[in-house]
Amino acid sequence: MKRLLELDVNLEKDYTLLVRLNADGEILNSPQPFVVAYKFNRQTSDWSQGHYFHNLKSAMDFLYE
């Protein structure tokens, strides 16, 4: 199962800002651990499409542009 932490939501665009976590609950050691997910399903942890970012600022800028 994916380990995700929901950081913010833009209800107007149906975007959810997520950070991907490792098994220890730390930010995933990945070039792009932040995801702005479109139509995120909290029950299944799936989404229709996503944009991936290397830092939180870039992800937040996209979430609200």
Image (cartoon, helix red, strand yellow):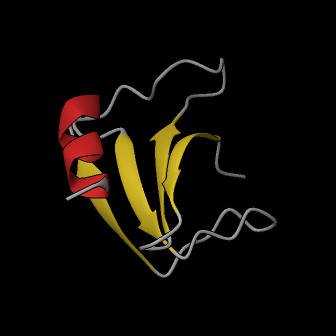
For the residue pair 60 and 25, the one nearer the viewer reads as 60
Q: Is residue 16 above or below residue 43?
A: above
* Residue 53 placement (x, y as % from top left): 23, 45
- Name the residue located 49 percent from the left edge and 82 percent from the top edge: 48
Query: Looking at the image, can residue 58 be seen?
Result: yes
Q: Is residue 20 above or below residue 23?
A: below
For this orientation, the residue located farthest to the right is 43
Q: Quadrant of the C terminus?
A: bottom left
Image mark count: 0
Image quarter of residue 41: bottom right
Left or right of 13 in this view: 60: left
Q: Answer left or right for 3 relative to 9.
A: right
Residue extending farthest to the front is 12
Name the residue located 81 percent from the left edge and 66 percent from the top edge: 43
Q: Would you identify the image quadrant in which residue 3 lies?
A: top right
> Can residue 55 be seen here?
no
Looking at the picture, how far across and down is residue 57, in whole percent? 21, 32
On screen, residue 65 versus residue 17, left or right, reads left
Instruction: Tell me what residue is drawn at x 31 percent, y 55 percent.
Output: 63
Direction from residue 8 to residue 51 in the image, left or right: left
Instruction: List x then y, in percent, for residue 5.
Output: 61, 37
Who's the residue at 46% across and 23% down the image? 27
